[in-house]
Image: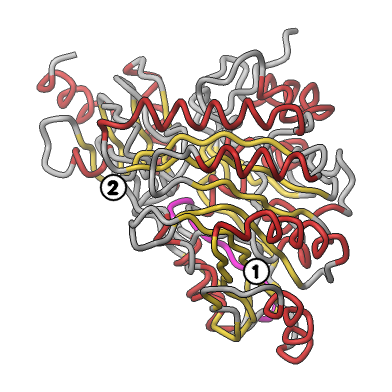
């Protein structure tokens, strides 16, 4: 549809739209269409930058009338770039950034365009927080709807375990409230089922007393110590208190030199005295070349890794839960990392234990409740000329680790080139139930630009 004709149709069909419509020739379109991952380069026919729930409802209706496929952007951080679409309508929530905290009830409702940096800034005014990512520029909606791991998960569970309710605009343009009492089937599906059931306009979370000071940071060792560091991490994580969450891995020095390091990053969210005792064994291990572990504001800790994931960098990720972290797995990780072609590449191990693993598998759509590790191959680079090499390294590394991986996959890290049916595999026993919910709320699969759950057939 030519641009003038499309403008005429927009003015006719959505005269009361309070936000902003952007087409390819408009000022602001280029910036608005970009998502965090610079490898993703899609051009929507139309971007509906919404100012509120009524705009979302109008945008869904407009997409139907113009016969445009829909993508939904919250924070735009999803590594596979599912927040955007070629030739369709991007429903953009980026300007919907309201956060409303009830300190007495210890809850907060936040709009769909909020990032964890904005969320934490408001909740920490009251000394409260909830599980929310390890990179503060990530959007709250996408992370939560896919499960939501974060620094507080071993003490307070995943982000989905702290979701109290949500406002959802469904495929037919209807606004629904989802909670344990209202539309409980939809609420169950939202807690891990991603954006399959509608546009989530706002999310309400349970908050916990956190900070303002917590204990955490990063400790780095020479790459020659990688074997010992990963073995230490394995042993240390066998008996952690709930208050302590740890991540380890192989990374490059942040100065861009390409120097390889072995690191442990952690957060202890309990009292500072208990935290000091809990992290002392880590600080005493080996001969680190950098140690930033200590008391710091929670907002600062939640942002400490942001610099490693700049907007616009090209990203290609692969991940899977490990069946075991034995010496051979560690050797394979080290061998793979020696061949990494980019000074921004990483191999990470995210440890799951505590409260996040005590939730029954079928309590939420997010099924991964076993104690263990999520292995993440992060290929990240800035130079388009090395794209093929960087993607090949990620794939080869993931293949090399395959003998040690379990069946589970974390949906927030799934790419668009996965063989077979990785979505069904990621949800495991919960997938059939999700298909039934999808058939009820989105039978025509209008919302398919996501980790798509196919509606159950009648």
Instruction: Name the one closer to the observer, 202 or 414.
Output: 414
- Secondary structure beneath dot 2 equals loop
Q: Classify residue 446 as left or right of residue 244.
A: left
Q: Which mark is residue 266?
A: 1
Q: Which residues are magenta?
A: 102-113
Q: Which mark is residue 18?
A: 2
Q: Classify residue 441 as left or right of residue 258.
A: right
Where 449 sits versus 167, above or below?
above
Q: According to the image, what is the colour scheme of the structure?
A: secondary structure
Disc 2 crowd, CA 10 A, few/some/many (<14, 14-19, 20+): some
- Quadrant position of the C terminus in the picture: top right
In the image, what residue occupies the spot 11% across and 42% down? 27
Where 402 sits versus 52, above or below?
above
Q: Is residue 388 magenta?
A: no
Give coordinates of residue 310: x percent, y percent. Answer: 35, 53
User: Residue lying furthest bottom in this view?
Assistant: 273
- Secondary structure beneath dot 1 equals strand
Instruction: Name the one closer to the observer, 297 or 173.
Output: 297
User: Residue lying furthest top in this view?
Assistant: 458
Mark 2–mark 1 Cα distance, whole angstroms, equals 43 Å
């Amino acid at each position: 549809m030519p641009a003038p004709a499309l403008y005429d149709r927009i003015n006719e069909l959505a005269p009361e739209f309070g936000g902003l419509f952007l087409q390819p020739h408009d000022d602001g379109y280029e910036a608005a269409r970009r998502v965090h991952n610079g490898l993703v380069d899609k051009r929507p026919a139309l971007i509906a930058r919404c100012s509120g729930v009524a705009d979302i409802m109008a945008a869904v209706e407009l997409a139907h009338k113009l016969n445009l496929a829909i993508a939904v952007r919250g924070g735009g951080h999803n590594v596979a770039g599912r927040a955007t679409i070629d030739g369709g309508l991007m429903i953009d929530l980026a300007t919907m950034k309201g956060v409303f905290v009830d300190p007495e009830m210890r809850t907060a409702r936040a709009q769909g365009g909020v990032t964890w940096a904005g969320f934490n800034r408001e909740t920490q005014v009251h000394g409260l927080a909830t599980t929310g990512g390890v990179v503060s520029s990530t959007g709250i909606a996408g992370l939560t709807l896919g499960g939501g791991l974060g620094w507080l998960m071993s003490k307070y569970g995943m982000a989905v375990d702290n979701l109290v309710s949500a406002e959802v605009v469904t495929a037919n343009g209807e606004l629904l409230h989802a909670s344990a009492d209202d539309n409980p089937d939809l609420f169950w599906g939202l807690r891990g089922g991603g954006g399959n059931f509608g546009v989530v306009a706002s999310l309400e979370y349970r908050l916990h007393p956190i900070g303002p000071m917590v204990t955490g940071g990063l400790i780095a060792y020479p790459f020659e110590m990688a074997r010992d560091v990963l073995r230490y991490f394995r042993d240390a994580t066998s008996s952690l208190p709930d208050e302590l969450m740890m991540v380890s891995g192989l990374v490059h020095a942040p100065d861009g030199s390409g120097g390889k390091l072995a690191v442990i990053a952690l957060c202890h969210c309990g009292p500072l005295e208990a935290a000091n005792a809990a992290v002392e064994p880590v600080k005493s291990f080996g001969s680190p070349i950098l140690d930033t572990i200590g008391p710091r504001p929670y907002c600062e800790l939640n942002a400490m890794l942001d610099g490693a994931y700049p907007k616009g960098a090209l990203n290609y990720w692969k991940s899977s839960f490990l069946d075991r972290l034995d010496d051979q797995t560690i050797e394979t990780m080290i061998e793979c990392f020696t061949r990494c072609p980019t000074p921004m590449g990483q191999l990470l191990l995210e440890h799951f234990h505590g409260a996040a693993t005590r939730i029954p598998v079928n309590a939420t759509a997010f099924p991964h409740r076993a104690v263990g590790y999520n292995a993440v191959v992060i290929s990240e680079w800035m130079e388009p000329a090395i794209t093929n090499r960087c993607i090949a390294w990620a794939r080869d590394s993931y293949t090399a680790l395959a003998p040690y991986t379990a069946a589970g996959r974390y949906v927030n890290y799934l790419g668009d080139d996965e063989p077979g049916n990785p979505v069904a595999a990621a949800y495991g026993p919960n997938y059939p139930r999700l298909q039934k919910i999808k058939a009820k709320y989105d039978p025509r699969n209008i919302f398919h630009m996501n980790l798509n759950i196919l509606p159950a057939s009648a």
